[in-house]
Image (tube, rainbow, N blue to C red):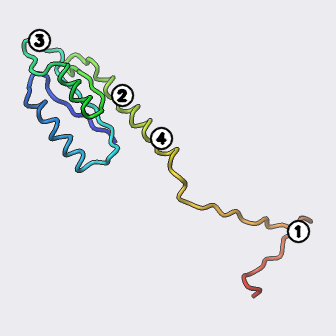
Amino acid sequence: MGILLVYDVTDESSFNNIRNWIRNIEQHASDNVNKILVGNKADMDESKRAVPTSKGQALADEYGIKFFETSAKTNMNVEEVFFSIGRDIKHRLAETDSRVEPQTLKINKPDQTDSGGQAAQKTTCCGS
């Protein structure tokens, strides 16, 4: 239903793998699966950062997905990411349900009594 693409902001090679992961998702997952790009370890000192926030945002914009920077260590934006993907999935499913035509046909049973309240005589096909 949803995929979090998480890379380490202090490791450019993990960021560079995102495009491969997205290709794998496009090949193997549903077309409409929700995705969010997440740069983790945002609590690290700027001198250790290898992937600037702007680069993460640009990649997310390129794929039309949301972007967050988080810190699992300090719990920064962790809940927000999960709530965001949960809301997105719920919204997508609600839209899908409202657009889907029913796959069944309802047939109403004829009233089993005649207008006088007595049981109506049963008929069979073709007069038999």
Q: Badge 3 is on which residue? A: 45
* Element type where label 2 sits in the image: helix
Instruction: Indicate the position of residue 55 as horizontal and vertical percent values.
Output: 17, 23
Residue 39 in the image: above or below residue 116: above
Lower sequence index among marks 4 and 2? 2
**What residue is rendered at 63% in x and 61% in y?**
106
Residue 13 in the image: above or below residue 20: above
Q: Which of the two discs, 3 and 4, sits closer to the camera?
A: 4
Instruction: Indicate the position of residue 95 as horizontal and vertical percent values.
Output: 47, 40
Q: Which of the two discs, 4 and 1, sits closer to the camera?
A: 4
Lower sequence index among marks 3 and 1? 3
Q: Badge 4 is on which residue? A: 95
Label number found at residue 118: 1
Task: Assess disc 1: are there few (<14), some (14-19) or many (≥20) residues with their C-alpha within 10 Å of its C-alpha.
Answer: few
The quadrant of the picture occupied by the C terminus is bottom right
Lower sequence index among marks 4 and 1? 4
| Residue type beneath disc 1 | Gln
